[in-house]
Amino acid sequence: MSIKKGEMVSMTRPVFVYGTLRRGLHNYERLLSGRTEEERRAVITGRLYAADHGRFPCLVKEGNTIVQGDIMYIQNDKYDDVLEDLDRLEGYDEGDTAGSEYVRDIVTVTDERGREIEAHTYYWNQPAGLGEHITSGDWVTWLQQKHRKPSGL
């Protein structure tokens, strides 16, 4: 592989996010804003739920819903810190996966250009608490519909 002068090549695995870490949402602002080198729309297959009375989403592997999200290419010099912050947010402990709220796994996602990319993502690791199934597979759309006010009085 030849690298041109000034070209940045990521040596880290990107992260696929599907919920509160998506651009424009609160955990994106807290943990990812200013720490990525590239962001793209992407999809994965699974099943998406609204956990904890709709406060956050959770993804399970079983299912064939197309789940919408974003693939985040983290800046190399911030990668370890970002992954540590994400693990903490998701309640993931590499040394205690059975006791973790979510488990980080390596998955294949399809980006907006149709490319298949290996990325980290977080799967729900609890036996209960799934909440409402998000049939659209899109947390952002679900939030918008849930908070839409009825019109016409």
Image (cartoon, rainbow, N blue to C red):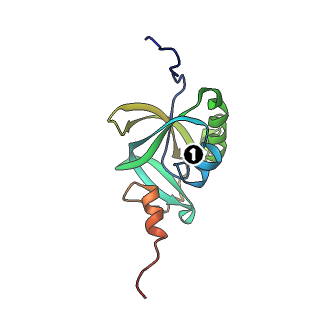
Residue at horizontal 53 percent and vertical 19 percent from the top: 6
Q: Is residue 25 visible?
A: yes
Residue 59 at x, y percent in the picture: 47, 49
Q: Residue furthest front?
A: 5
- The quarter of the picture where the N terminus appears is top left
Kind of residue sitting beneath label 1: Tyr
Where 148 falls versus 65 (above or below)? Answer: below
Q: Position of residue 8 (x, y in %)?
A: 52, 22
Residue under the image location 62 percent in, 30 percent down = 79
Helix, strand or loop status at disc 1: strand
Would you identify the image quadrant in which residue 96 lies? top right
Can the viewer see residue 91 in this picture? no
Total labels drawn: 1
Q: Within 10 Å of the Cα at label 1, are there few (<14), some (14-19), or many (20+) other Cα atoms?
A: many
Q: Position of residue 32 (x, y in %)?
A: 60, 42
Q: Nearer the viewer, residue 19 or 35?
A: 35
Residue 110 vertical position relative to residue 11 in the rendered view, above or below: below
The C terminus lies in which quarter of the figure?
Answer: bottom left
Residue 14 x/y as whole percent: 51, 33
Residue farthest toward the bottom in the current orientation of the protein: 153
Position above or below: 137 against 92? below
Q: Nearer the viewer, residue 12 or 49?
A: 12
Q: Residue at x 54, y 26 (%)?
A: 12
Report the side of 80 relative to 4 (left or right): right
Circle 1 sits on which residue? 102
- Which residue lies at the image location 46% right of the left edge and 64% below the top edge? 144
As rendered, which of 153 and 46 lies closer to the eye? 153
